[in-house]
Image: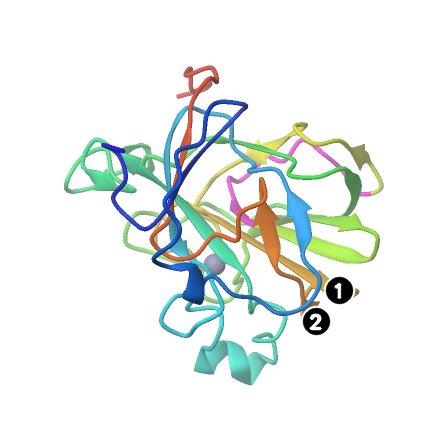
Amino acid sequence: MLWVIGIIAIVIMGCTAPKDDDKQEEVRYYQGESIYLDFPFEHGGRYYIGQGGHQKSQNYHYWNEKYNKLGINVSMRYAVDIHMIGEAGIDREVDEATSLDDFTMYKVTLYSPTDGVIEYVEDGHPDMGPDDRDSENLWGNHIIINVDDVKIVLAHLKYGSIIVEKGQKVKKGDHLAKIGKSGNAVVPHLHIQAAKNDPWNGQPVPMLFDGEFLIKGDIVKVDCAYNELEDK
Ligand SMILES: [Zn+2]
């Protein structure tokens, strides 16, 4: 397991999956009925879970004063931030990023993690520069997919990249958008969360990606996929 930096590594896309999750089993915990999703990226590489899990120490979304004041802590409880490891480490192709293209996750294609119906699309927020973020529009450009009244939010998408529209049925693996740096994002990454009935205030739904409840520090290796990053 040469490439295991964190706690667990899984290989998706139908390849063998070396796993070592014994030592962290006790922190890999969630409550309530979960939803099974596909990992939403097919671009080959190593993805890093920056935030995820049920503990304050694992997941910034789980308890955050600002979010609490906005009343959105509950729905975000099991939110996961998915980053990617680049040439210069987590998120970065170079040590000092001077443009968005220096970030590994920028413009990576996002695929639908589920069958469902597009319930909401918001575009029009600019991708913020390496040192800026839009704290007024937390999710920036985002898509909400409805699956049996569970609302899946996919946020921080690239300006103008969303190719689905409200009311459209989507299938697992459908191209949805590209990853950007819109909204309150320090670096380009995907924020994904699931909540029952109401994306902002609904009861949080734990997400299992290819059967795994991902927590902070996990690395997901995607191979057996094409490696060309379109449009980059
Ligand atoms: Zn997030």
Disc number placed over residue 203 in the picture, else none: 2
Pick the front one: 35 or 122: 35
Question: Can residue 98 be seen in the rendering of this structure?
Answer: no
Q: Residue at x 44, y 31 (%)?
A: 17
For the residue labelled by badge 2, is the local secondary structure a helix, a strand or a loop? strand
For the residue labelled by badge 1, is the local secondary structure a helix, a strand or a loop? strand
Scheme by which the image is coloured: rainbow
Q: Residue at x 49, y 72 (%)?
A: 62
- Quadrant into which the C terminus falls: top left
Question: Can residue 31 be seen in the rendering of this structure?
Answer: yes
Give the distance between the C-alpha atoms of the residues marked 2 and 1, in whole angstroms.
5 Å
In screen coordinates, is 3 left or right of 127? left
What is the quadrant of residue 112 in the picture?
A: top right
Counting residues from the start of the chain, the first of labels 2 and 1 encountered is 1
Q: Main secondary structure of the magenta part?
A: loop
Residue 92 coordinates in the image, percent (x, y): 25, 39
Q: Verify whether residue 163 appears in magenta.
A: yes
Residue 142 coordinates in the image, percent (x, y): 61, 49
Q: Residue at x 53, y 25 (%)?
A: 13
**Which residue sits furthest front?**
22
Q: Is residue 153 above or below residue 136?
A: above
Disc number placed over residue 153 in the picture, else none: none
Instruction: Name the residue carrying label 1.
Output: 196
Q: Is mark 2 within 8 Å of ligand 1?
A: no
Q: Residues within 10 Å of mark 2 (few under 14, many from 20)?
A: some
Pick the front one: 225 or 120: 225
* Type of the residue with mark 1: Lys
Q: Verify whether residue 54 appears in magenta.
A: no
Q: Which residues are magenta?
A: 155-166
Count of numbered circles in the view: 2
Residue 221 coordinates in the image, percent (x, y): 39, 32
Verify CB contact (< 8 Å) between mark 2 and mark 1: yes
